[in-house]
Amino acid sequence: MSNHPLFTDTTIPLSVTLAATIGLEEALLLTIFNQAAQLQPQSQRNGIRISRECLRQQLPFWDDVTIRRTLASLIEKGMVQLHGPMYPESAEMLLGFDSQNTSSQPLPSDVRAAYPPQGNSQNHHSGQPVAHSPQHGSPQHGSQQPSQHNTPRYSSIGTDWKPSQDTLTRLQQRGIGQSFVWAQLDSFILHAQEAGPNRNDWNARFFNHVKNQWVYAQNDAERQKQFQQEREEQQLNRSGFKVAQDEAAPIQPSWRPSADALQILQRADIDQQFIEDAIPEFVLYWSERGDAVKTWNTKFLQHVRSQWARYSASMEHSNVPMPIDRNWQPSSDCYDILAMAHIDTQFARERVAEFVLYWRDSGQVHNSWNSRFLQYVKQQWGKRLAQSGDAHGTASNQSAAQPGYTTAEASVQRLNDTSW
């Protein structure tokens, strides 16, 4: 009997006995750890290193809150020992399987309070205790847990709530812009306040909310774009330059696109010379094929749009070195990257003119002026921080030796600095 068509990727083998003993979620996470341990040398089988991103890829159906809670439960039950920061505070975790290892890192107090052990810590199949203290490795019954561990710390969401930096970073890694993320914050808080319940996973819920809204927005934009193109093509086919009732015919050597077709392409910000250069190629191709078509204008629209998209992509990621343009400006991605490095955006904008002037005077060519600009601004920002952070005894001396940013001599020094 063939497999179900939904089983198209790797499956996770899960022990039914293990799941019944320690819980389904705990058994699933422990299986992932065990598979990772099998890929390591035999001498390291009692401990594993696993990265945060690898764990997220292995468990895409869980958020960080669920993974953290389940890992805390495994540690409380003595199934694994944590050596280092708790997930997801570190980019990599070090875990141990050896129950005799007494160097296990204790759980942080906030993690123990938020994720208390569930149910009895006894192994119901063997009758032996399976939960060990993270600090001493000795058996510890669930009834001996402190009273504050019995209730997770839930809280309601306030009007001044903000997502964590880790949540913002994960959203940015999915290609979601910060402006879109912050635009969803008010609606998320309003919905959460109307829903009413106190929770401890607001960051995870905000991540899912923004991700879903992004998918909806992308789908709406694509549908709107498709609708606009279809409407323009319908208007073009109804124009008087070619009657729809005409019979299909091969393209003529003197054929040119209609004025409506040219206007549509120009509204799409396609260069006029690029359109004119595409006409002979288009006519030659379809003349050699000899196909009879009614809507040559529509075919020309599709051809030019496709070629322009390829051309634009090749220019943006060109491997051919080019001189810097007189009116060159860094892309918005440059400013986003500098902002993430805590570099003032206004400071970066003020460096554009001198950057362009220097490289135009030098006459050199490069593949990526954006990369060059990033290096230059980071270097200038570092110099500025070094100047402002000097001790009182040396600040005045350096001020005398190095003119300020506003002097002509300083500008000349910076333009002659080619180390970046």
Image (cartoon, helix red, strand yellow):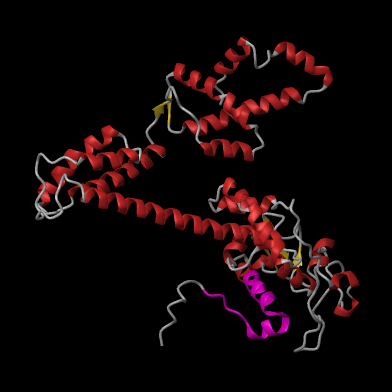
Q: Can residue 108 be seen in this view?
A: no
- Give the image location of residue 6, x and y in percent: 46, 76
Say above or below: 51 vs 298: below
Q: Verify whether residue 4 appears in magenta.
A: no
- Give the image location of residue 367, x and y in percent: 43, 33
- Give the image location of residue 190, x and y in percent: 68, 58
Compare residues 42 and 276 and report the one nearer the observer. Answer: 276
In the image: residue 252, left or right of residue 388: left
Residue name at image x 72 percent, y 25 percent: 386
- Specify the quadrant of the image occupied by residue 87: bottom right
Residue name at image x 70 percent, y 66 percent: 195
Compare residues 419 and 41 and report the one nearer the observer. Answer: 419
Compare residues 187 and 308 and report the one nearer the observer. Answer: 187
In the image: residue 52, left or right of residue 106: left
Residue name at image x 56 percent, y 47 percent: 177
Q: Give the range drawn in magenta.
A: 11-34
Q: Quadrant of the N terminus?
A: bottom left
Say above or below: 231 vs 132: above
Q: Quadrant of the C terminus?
A: top right
Residue name at image x 68 percent, y 67 percent: 66
Say above or below: 245 vs 353: below
Q: Is residue 212 visible?
A: yes
In the image: residue 307, left or right of residue 285: right
Q: Verify whether residue 13 appears in magenta.
A: yes
Compare residues 102 and 60 and report the one nearer the observer. Answer: 60
